[in-house]
Each structure stands twice: as C-alpha cells, then as structure tokens.
Image: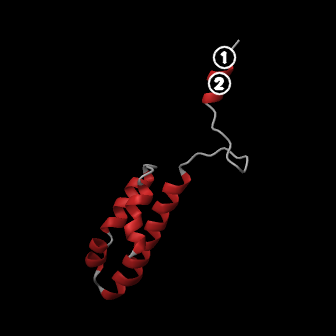
C-alpha cells in the first residue's frame, strides 16, 4: 500500500481557482513582454533609422531578462522591473 503522504507531495497543489499552479507562467510572460519590446524597438525604429546596433545595445538589459525568464527563475520580475519603469 503506497504512502498517502508521499503521493500527495509530488502533485501540485491547486490554487484559489482550483487549477494546479505551476508558478512558471509569470517569468515566461515577462520574457515574452521583453521580446515584444525589443522587436518593436529594433525592428520598428532601428531598421528605418539605420541604427540597429545602437538599439540592440540599448536593449541589452531586456535581453538579460529574457534569458532569466526562459530559465523560469523567480528573479525575472526583479531583473525586468527597472527596464519596465523607464
């Protein structure tokens, strides 16, 4: 007979809505938001101006947030916060 305590610890706990919470959706959403901002700045502004390198360098902090977000780190929000404030 399997231990009930061992089997319940491996399943995710339901959130207030009744659905299991993975906790990894927020870092991915932040990474996607950063990527959209980079695409708009580099593609929408950098290509017509001919200053793509300048806009890529200016978006380097957002690239760091994308890397950390794709790793599903909980520090993603703190890393991206200064970028979203300015």
Q: Residue at x 44, y 53 (%)?
A: 70
Q: Residues within 10 Å of mark 1 (few under 14, many from 20)?
A: few
- On the image, which quarter does residue 55 sit in? bottom left
Quarter of the C terminus within the rendering: bottom left
Locate residue 25 relative to residue 49 in the image: left or right.
right
Residue assigned mark 1: 3
Q: Quadrant of the N terminus?
A: top right
| Other residues around mark 2 within 10 Å, as few (<14) / some (14–19) / many (≥20) | few
Between 69 and 74, the residue placed more toward the observer is 74
Residue 39 locus on image (x, y percent) = 42, 73
Secondary structure at numbered mark 2 = helix
What residue sits right under mark 2 in the picture? 7
Its colouring scheme is secondary structure
* x then y, percent, for residue 36: 47, 70
Residue at the far front: name it: 16
Q: Is residue 85 above or below residue 64?
A: below
Nearer-the-camera pick, 70 or 47: 70
Indicate whether 12 appears above or below 29. above
């Amino acid at each position: 007979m399997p231990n009930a305590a061992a089997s319940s610890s491996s399943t995710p706990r339901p959130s207030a809505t009744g659905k299991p919470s993975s906790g990894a959706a927020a870092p991915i959403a932040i990474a996607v938001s950063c990527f959209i901002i980079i695409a708009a700045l580099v593609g929408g502004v950098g290509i017509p101006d001919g200053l793509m390198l300048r806009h890529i360098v200016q978006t380097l902090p957002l690239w760091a947030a994308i890397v950390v977000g794709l790793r599903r780190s909980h520090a993603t929000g703190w890393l991206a916060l200064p970028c979203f404030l300015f």
